[in-house]
Image: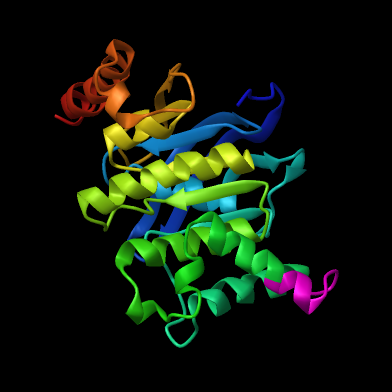
Amino acid sequence: MALRDEKFIDIHQAEMVFHTRKGDFHALREINLTVRKGEFVTLIGHSGCGKSTLLNLIAGLLQPSDGVLLCANREIAGPSPERAVVFQNHSLLPWLSCFENVFLGVERVFSATESKAALKERTNAALALVGLTPSAQKRPNEISGGMKQRVGIARALAMEPKVLLMDEPFGALDALTRAHLQDELLKIVAKTESTVVMVTHDVDEAVLLSDRIVMMTNGPAATIGEIVDVRLPRPRERVMLAQDPFYAKYRTTVLEFLYRKQIRVAA
């Protein structure tokens, strides 16, 4: 998939200071980042470096203390269906079926412009996209953790967001389920041409999925330390990439930043 050249998300001199009873906590400083339409960007860094804070700023769940964030040339002033969020916790309503959990979001976004039949069709299409049609009528306690995360992804995609924001969506899953969902996400993003910003702690996940890896410095007052352009062809196959010298190079570059440069600075 060819990326478009124009800025789609534009973050300029963003700062985030939290005012607490113990005093001000400077979480992020001088964040400057652009994301192109159709690009997959991961945010990686040690715990406490502000990755989720930055994602929440893009989502509009937080407002910056200073600076400006734009999406499609409009200032991000609050949450919007154009920026859908998939959290580490699937956040499904336990008394609703998989279909109903997805339909709830679809109804809120499209009920004013689409018939109920169209809303149901949109919901079914999203569940089919993540391979959950057979489980549509099951409730969350009747499906696996990986399937719950797929429902969360389906709910986000069903709203046809301009940007898909993901906060470690596979972090709590076992290795095999995680690998399977990473492969599924690659296929879904290729099909939908979504713009994605994803928080991860997993170096291999970042290299496998990303067009660019944004590496954050340690907090407090964390900022962007380095950005790696991942020039691996798509579609990507994890088994083949394991033998690719460029894959190993990108992986080493990220590890060098995280486990040598940052640890040395912290010391």
Give x and y (percent) for residue 221.
38, 39
Quadrant of the rendering where the N terminus is positioned: top right
The coloring applied to the image is rainbow
Residue at 19 percent across and 31 percent down: it is 266
Q: Relative to residue 51, is residue 40 depicted above or below?
A: above
Residue at 73% from the left image edge and 45% from the top image edge: 75
Task: Compare residues 261 and 155 and report the one nearer the observer.
Answer: 155
Segment tinted magenta in the rendering: 111-120
Q: Nearer the viewer, residue 135 or 36?
A: 135
Is 145 colored magenta in this rendering? no
Answer whether residue 116 is magenta in the image: yes
Residue at the spot 21% in from the left edge and 49% down from the top edge: 175
Q: Is residue 224 above or below residue 65?
A: above
Report the quarter where the C terminus lies: top left
Residue 100 seen: yes
Most distant residue in the top direction: 245
Where residue 204 appears, as percent x and y from the top left, is: 28, 32
Res 39 quadrant in image: top right
**Viewer-proximal residue, 158 or 74?**
158
Which residue extends farthest right? Answer: 113
Q: Which image quadrant is residue 78 in? A: bottom right
